[in-house]
Image (cartoon, rainbow, N blue to C red):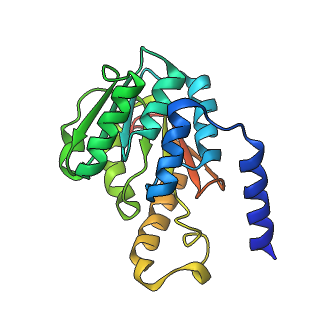
């Protein structure tokens, strides 16, 4: 019964929220038709509200895909924002470049091409917001590479933290996904209990974690 209720709630929310327009709507249709993972509709609206509240000028994104979320960020924040995003899939990169050019944000969004493990340690500067939306089994690894680049008072957003519901309950876990689920649970346990973050877990889309950086890691 709970699954039926959850599905009805999700359907209600998605049908109630206003549809995107223009290129963003086009990208949503493209993603659905080509099985491209982008943020869920309700999550994208949450991101828009957070961006309007926080007005970040610098954003680091791990996982670009076709550029949907980067374009959403730039569209919401405006022409002063600088976004650095990482992607390793060559076909996704080409599509993202095309979409970013169409959106007119070539000067705002920089794609770093290659494996995040290799590229993230080389990223310089301080960021107002970091968005994790890449390999789910590697979130803690990516986190350790980027958290010191997030300013105090900055926001870390981790998407898809429930991983199709499997993280929430063992009954949902597919055997071949056990390692990913275990790693994600360990990641969530860490960000919810470390003393320099304030974290909230939100059960919309496939789960979102919002983490506010209270102080630098390792300080009292």
Location of residue 74 with respect to 123 vertically, above or below: above
Q: Quadrant of residue 17?
A: top right
- Of the pair 126 and 15, the residue shown nearer to us: 15
Residue visible at 38% across and 27% down in the picture: 102
Q: Quadrant of residue 93?
A: top left
What percent of the width, then of the height, locates residue 65? Answer: 37, 47
Q: Quadrant of residue 68?
A: top left
Q: Is residue 218 visible?
A: no
Residue visible at 48% across and 17% down in the picture: 78
- Of the pair 115 and 195, the residue shown nearer to us: 115
Residue visible at 36% across and 44% down in the picture: 64
Location of residue 186 with respect to 108 vertically, above or below: below
Q: Relative to 7, is 142 on the left or the right? A: left
Q: Quadrant of the C terminus?
A: top left
**What residue occupies the far top of the structure in this picture?**
80
- Of the pair 25 and 51, the residue shown nearer to us: 25
Residue visible at 36% across and 49% down in the picture: 143
Q: Relative to 109, is 43 on the left or the right? A: right
Q: Relative to 194, is 106 on the left or the right? A: left
What percent of the width, then of the height, locates residue 173? Answer: 53, 80
């Amino acid at each position: 019964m709970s699954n039926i209720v959850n599905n009805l709630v999700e359907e209600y929310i998605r049908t109630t929220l206003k549809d995107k327009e223009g290129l963003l709507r086009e990208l949503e249709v493209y993603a659905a038709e080509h099985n491209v993972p982008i943020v869920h509709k309700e999550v994208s609206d949450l991101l828009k509200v957070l961006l309007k509240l926080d007005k970040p000028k610098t954003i680091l994104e791990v996982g670009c895909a076709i550029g949907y979320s980067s374009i959403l960020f730039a569209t919401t924040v405006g022409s002063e924002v600088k976004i650095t995003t990482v992607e390793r899939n060559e076909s996704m990169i080409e599509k993202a470049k095309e979409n970013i050019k169409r959106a007119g944000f070539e000067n705002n969004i920089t794609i770093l091409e290659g494996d995040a493990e290799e590229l993230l340690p080389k990223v310089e500067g301080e960021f107002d917001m970091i968005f994790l939306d890449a390999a789910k089994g590697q979130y803690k690894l990516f986190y350790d590479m980027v958290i010191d680049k997030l300013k105090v008072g900055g926001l870390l957003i981790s998407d898809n933290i429930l991983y199709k519901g499997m993280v929430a309950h063992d009954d949902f876990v597919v055997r071949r996904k056990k390692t990913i689920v275990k790693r994600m649970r360990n990641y969530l346990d860490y960000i919810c209990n470390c003393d320099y973050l304030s974290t909230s877990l939100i059960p919309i889309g496939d789960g979102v974690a919002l983490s506010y950086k209270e102080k630098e890691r390792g300080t009292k």
